[in-house]
Amino acid sequence: MKFLDLAKVYIRSGSGGNGCISFRREKFIEYGGPDGGDGGGGGSVWAEAVDGLNTLIDFRYQQHFFAKNGQQGMGNQRTGKDGDDIVLRVPAGTELLDEDQETVIADLAEVGDRVLLAKGGNGGFGNLHFKTSTNQAPRRANPGQEGVERTIWLRLKLIADVGLLGLPNAGKSTFLAATSNARPKIADYPFTTLHPNLGVVGVDGVEFVVADIPGLIDGASEGRGLGDLFLGHVERCSVLLHLVDATAENVVEDYQTIVREISAYGHVLAEKPRVTVLNKSDALGPELTQMVREELEEAIGQKVMTMSGVAGEGVTEVLRALRAEIAEDKLRQKIESEEDEGETGTWQP
């Protein structure tokens, strides 16, 4: 199945049915009076986050979603049938954007989140609705309200606890394959990973989700390489795992390249907790790995861990560090949520 994280769709809610002009015509009954019914309401267009989806590929093959119109009113005081609603079923983590691709309509972050995109038109009143003591035979009815037509964009941001960052061939896919059941493509050339991959990782009886995105290069924020096209998928992560290739000519420059690109991307990505790991330590040996590690720690002023995704050395320690950061982030979010509820709560004496 192909991965698609951006889709354009055209939606239109149903128009309301017209009201009916009708009079009761029955043998032996004089002055039957008006009996025209109201029109039915048009169907609405909804979007809902559902379980079991992780791509927007369905919207590649169907872009138009039109709800049914309401049925017009009929005689004998019969109201028209309402039009059926349409529900766009999207993966959890989908943002709904207006046509300008900047205005956020809604963020369906969790399964079950639901939003109204286009409300169906109201049905028109039939002439029975206008009957009064002074106008007992009205000959007027309202037309149904027109539906709403609009263009929206769907943008998927994967729900994951850990996001992998690094230059191409830093070992991100190898790490994901070694620690989870995910089977991303692994090769010895740049940009092997073309689409984000998800994997469920477990350590000490706790599981969390890791997202692997295509590697960044210098100038990615300006569109070079695959650009920052997939950085949105790690915006929701609790912690970023920054992998640096220990066999690179200049590990400090490689590290700074990624930091520059996520800073240029914005969206608070540079402020997220980050675990820096020197990968492919098995290729250098213990002594040389320690020298490179000390050089990187001195340059960036923070702790650097070492591991080998292929050999499995140091992987467990890295997973435990990620688990600790995830727990701390969830605790911080819980405290912030409680503070917000306290600020908006009703005053009590």
Image (spheres, grey):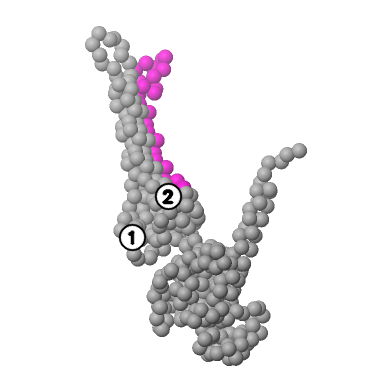
193 to the left or right of 29: right
Of residues 106 and 29, the one nearer the viewer is 106
Q: Residue at x 39, y 23 (%)?
A: 129
What SS does tag 1 mark? helix
Q: Position of residue 193 (x, y in %)?
A: 41, 75
Q: Which residues are magenta?
A: 114-140
Quarter of the image for residue 258 reads bottom right
Q: Residues within 10 Å of mark 1 (few under 14, many from 20)?
A: few
Q: Residue at x 52, y 69 (%)?
A: 163
- In the picture of the structure, the residue carrying the numbered disc 2 is 47
Instruction: Determine the secondary structure under disc 2.
Output: strand
Depth check: 106 or 198 in front? 198
Give the image quarter of residue 326.
Answer: bottom right
Residues at marks 2 and 1, CA–CA distance in whole angstroms: 16 Å
Q: Amino acid at mark 2?
A: Ala
Q: Residue at x 34, y 28 (%)?
A: 79
- Position of the N terminus, as image quadrant, is bottom left
Is 126 part of what is drawn in magenta? yes
Mark 1 is on which residue type? Arg
In the visual, does 185 lie left or right of 238? Answer: left
Residue underneath mark 1: 60
Any part of residue 218 in sight: no
